[in-house]
């Protein structure tokens, strides 16, 4: 345990002291290192980017590096020589830090120019770091410009700003500009993990991601939140601890909402709405959070990977399962409805009712799932070969009730007509097959249950999907599925994945569509009604 007297805030303790320690800004540090290595130092740099991403920290490293008596590899400041130590402790006469927000008058800049005339006392450069430079008055900028136009060789300016558009073009054109990136949630979480491990703080990944997400791209904010959470917690810190301390909704609530939608349980959805409101969570934040949650599910659905999800491994696994419960069309539709609710929330006199309405709309969403399946089945019916002509001996055979609808009795030998769908069920109980999938194929379960049973021939098994995501996922697991099928059937089969025309290549719009309809995407239900049932849209009706 650290006693209060020796307690140093994390952001200060872990402030990078070398270019190699700056997190998430490699594009900046690489260029700066190259400039230092080749000795081509520009006389003015402009560091742009959001707050807390390392602009001032990097400026200080540059200031030390250019003045260091013994830089490592000729680039990194040693942080041990007199010059480095003076700069670190703030005693150096050669490095001056100015807060542009409070020293923004023309007098301040005149004084700066007066001092800038004198060469550095120790090092090679006199470095001026001006933070929030966009706050300077226009006369101060003009005074600064005169120095920038004819800079003495020993002078180095580093300007930092969160609002580069407010820096006059005349100043910008005389600077080399670097844009610092907002840090990704994952970069922040990973860095917090390094700190937590080094300081022996017991905290789980979920907690670190919750902090990182709340910090919204700022490493400095993340580190102070980390301190805050650490001060309150006794024992190992979990995601729930963090969310309680920051008063934010947990992912579990969003997963519960999508569960309720998938199960079409309005009762459960309303229960969740009551919990959100009852615990005093901000409804706007909750809806924005739901939108992000749906976006994550859509990302996984569309890419077939959780690579782009900024969450702990456990949560990412949850997303890959969630993505299988909805089609892309469903998710896009759900996002549209949610975004609409978010936009209109500020006009709502009773936000809670708006939240309930949103959840009710989502629960009662006509799923593209059912329609996708319908289309796939229609396509399959159409692509089946015509019924073979009856053999001359047919009338002599005893008539059975089901021969009228099914040309292939379920127990017929497979050699008779291997291309028929019915043959698949003859050799393989499809539902039982799905139910007993091994863990390696478990992820396919919802897809296989959703799409029509495959067409099985002697050495080929053809799946027909209307959804690109389904096809992609099947493709990914093709080999494993082939091996497993071979084991079940006692012979090798090649899997073929056919994308049904409805999803792969939408038919051109029928000529009778009015322009009022064609200006926006049709909902899947509308497409089916128009294409399959010859429905027409009435112009002007939304
Ligand atoms: Zn040094």
Image: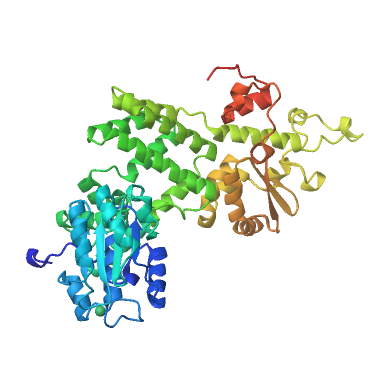
* Quarter of image, res 232: bottom left
Q: Residue furthest bottom?
A: 70
Q: Residue 364 in the image: x percent, y percent?
A: 46, 27
- Position of 523 compared to 486: left or right? left
Residue 81 point in image, percent of width and height: 22, 81
Determine whether 117 is above or below 180 in the image.
below
Give residue 417's position: percent from left, percent from top.
Answer: 80, 44
| Residue 432 in view in this figure | no
Horizontal side of residue 293 vs 504, given as left or right = left
- In the current view of this chain or complex, which residue is farthest to the right? 392
Instruction: Determine whether, in the image, residue 203 is placed left or right of residue 538.
Output: left
Say which residue appears at 45% left-offset and 53% top-offset: 308
Vertical relation: 88 (above or below) 285: below
Q: Residue at 66% across / 58% down in the picture?
A: 486
Q: For this rendering, which residue is in front, 181 or 136?
A: 136
Q: Residue at x 36, y 28 (%)?
A: 267
Above/below status of 334 relative to 53: above
Q: Which quadrant of the frame does ligand 1 lie within?
A: bottom left
Q: Report the front residue among 230 and 255.
A: 230
Q: Residue 185 in the image: x percent, y percent?
A: 35, 54
Give the residue displayed 74% in from the left and 54% down from the top.
459
Q: How many labels, in total?
A: 0
The N terminus: image quadrant: bottom left
Of 307 and 129, the residue lying toward us: 129
């Amino acid at each position: 345990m650290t006693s209060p007297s020796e307690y140093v805030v994390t952001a200060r303790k872990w402030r990078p002291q070398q270019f190699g320690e700056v997190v998430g800004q490699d594009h900046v540090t690489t260029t700066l290192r190259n400039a230092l290595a080749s000795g081509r130092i520009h006389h003015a740099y402009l560091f742009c980017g959001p707050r807390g991403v390392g602009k001032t920290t990097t400026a200080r490293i540059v200031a030390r590096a250019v003045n260091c008596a013994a830089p490592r590899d000729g680039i990194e400041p040693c942080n041990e020589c007199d010059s480095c130590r003076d700069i670190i402790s703030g005693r150096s006469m050669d490095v001056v830090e100015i807060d542009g927000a409070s020293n923004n008058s023309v007098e301040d800049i005149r004084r700066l120019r007066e001092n800038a005339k004198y060469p550095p006392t120790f090092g090679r450069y006199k470095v001026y770091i001006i933070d929030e430079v966009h706050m300077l008055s226009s006369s101060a900028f003009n005074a600064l410009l005169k120095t920038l136009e004819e800079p003495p060789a020993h002078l180095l300016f580093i300007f930092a700003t969160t609002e580069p558009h407010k820096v006059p073009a005349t100043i910008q054109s005389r600077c080399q500009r670097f844009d610092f990136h907002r840090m990704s949630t994952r970069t922040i979480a990973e860095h917090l993990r390094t700190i937590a491990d080094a300081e022996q703080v017991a905290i789980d990944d979920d907690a670190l991601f919750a902090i990182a997400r709340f910090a919204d791209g700022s490493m400095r904010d993340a580190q102070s939140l980390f301190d805050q959470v650490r001060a309150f917690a006794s024992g190992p810190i979990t995601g729930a601890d963090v969310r309680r301390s920051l008063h934010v909704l947990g992912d579990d609530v969003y997963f519960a909402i999508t569960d309720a939608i998938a199960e079409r349980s309005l009762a459960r959805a309303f229960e969740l709405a009551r919990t959100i409101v009852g615990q005093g969570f901000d409804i706007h934040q909750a809806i924005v959070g739901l939108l992000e949650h749906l976006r994550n599910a859509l990302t996984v659905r569309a890419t077939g990977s959780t690579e782009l999800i900024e969450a702990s491994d456990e949560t990412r696994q949850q997303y890959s399962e969630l993505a299988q419960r909805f089609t892309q069309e469903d998710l896009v539709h759900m996002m549209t409805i949610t975004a609409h609710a978010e936009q209109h929330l500020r006009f709502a006199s009773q936000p809670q009712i708006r939240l309930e309405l949103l959840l009710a709309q989502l629960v009662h969403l006509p799923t593209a799932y059912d329609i996708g399946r319908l289309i796939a089945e229609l396509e399959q019916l159409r692509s089946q070969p015509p019924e073979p002509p009856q053999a001359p001996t047919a009338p002599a055979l005893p008539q059975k009730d089901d021969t009228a609808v099914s040309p292939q009795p379920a127990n017929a030998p497979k050699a008779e007509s291997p291309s028929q769908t019915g043959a698949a069920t003859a050799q393989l109980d499809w539902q039982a097959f799905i139910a007993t999938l091994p863990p390696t194929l478990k992820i396919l379960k919802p897809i296989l249950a959703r799409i029509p049973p495959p067409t099985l021939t002697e050495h080929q098994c053809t799946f027909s999907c209307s959804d690109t995501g389904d096809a992609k996922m099947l493709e990914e697991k093709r080999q494993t599925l082939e091996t497993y099928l071979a084991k079940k059937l006692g012979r090798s089969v090649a899997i073929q994945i056919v994308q049904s025309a409805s999803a792969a290549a939408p038919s051109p719009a029928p000529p009778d569509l009015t322009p009022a309809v064609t200006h926006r995407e049709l909902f899947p239900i509308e497409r089916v009604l128009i294409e399959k049932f010859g429905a027409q849209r009435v112009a002007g009706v939304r």
